Amino acid sequence: MDNYDLQVDTGKRIFLEYDQKLMIRKFRLDADTQYIYLTYLNTPCRICRCSGGIEEQICGQWRECRDFSTVMTVYDLLCYHKGEASPALSHQWCTVGTFVVTGVTQTDTFTKKCATLFDGRLDDLKAAVQKLGGVLQPPVAGADLTCYFPVTPFFPVLLQFWQGDDEFEPKLMLLWDRNTNSFLHFETTFYLQGDLLNRLQCGMEERI
């Protein structure tokens, strides 16, 4: 097992230390005696209440998910907030640096490569966005693509993409609700961003 696999197993054990009844009530999740259910990036997921393991429903079949970014994002969204009631969205979008006081706030290294890969393939990108449950929005700030992603039913992000031209390189930006730090750790925003962009790339490759 590599370090990521070890951390996934550690995450499963830590998840079991949390009050499952509280998170079910707080985030209005479906559950039975065996599993807690939620949708993550338009993929049905369930968490075993005995082992903490996460499964995804792929082509009608439940399969264990051991992707580090997916697993850690789901655990953090369910476990990070300590209050009895669910955290509230501000419905105001901002860059990740807005709600971080210290530490690395630049995400250009995560997005620049993807912007280049997406450039000139706007129709493929739109199709991949919709496959992940993204909802196309009216253009914002001249972007060629603006879409709203319900990462889970209770936490969204906004993606914007500008195609390149003779003067400007292609640009991709992920925007966050101003209250994001009430939902997850700052570090987890990088996991979520990477997971989302990887899934978009896979969706576009399927159209080749």
Image (cartoon, rainbow, N blue to C red):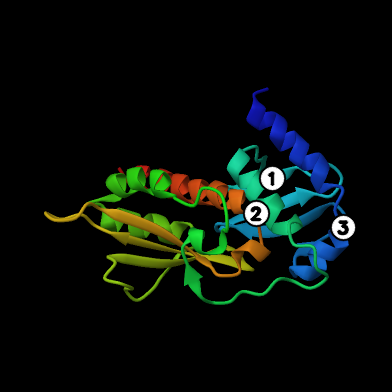
Residue 109 seen? yes
Q: Nearer the viewer, mark 1 or mark 3?
A: 3
Q: Residue 141 location, x and y as percent? A: 30, 72
Q: Quadrant of residue 143?
A: bottom left
Q: Residue 48 location, x and y as percent? A: 80, 47
Q: Quadrant of the C terminus?
A: top left
Cα separation between marks 1 and 3: 20 Å
Q: Residue at x 55, y 66 (%)?
A: 156
Nearest the eye: 40 or 170? 170
Q: Nearer the viewer, mark 2 or mark 1?
A: 2
Q: Residue furthest left?
A: 166
Residue 56 seen? no
Q: Residue at x 70, y 71 (%)?
A: 87
Cα separation between marks 2 and 3: 19 Å
Q: Residue furthest top?
A: 1
Mark 3 or mark 1, which is nearer the start of the sequence?
3
Q: Which residue is mark 3?
A: 19
Indicate the secondary structure of the residue bearing disc 2: loop
Answer left or right for 171 relative to 180. left
Q: Residue 88 location, x and y as percent? A: 67, 75
Identity, as a three-letter code, of the amino acid under mark 2 = His
Q: Which residue is mark 2?
A: 185
Q: Residue 93 location, x and y as percent? A: 48, 71
Indicate the secondary structure of the residue bearing disc 1: strand
Q: Which residue is mark 1?
A: 55
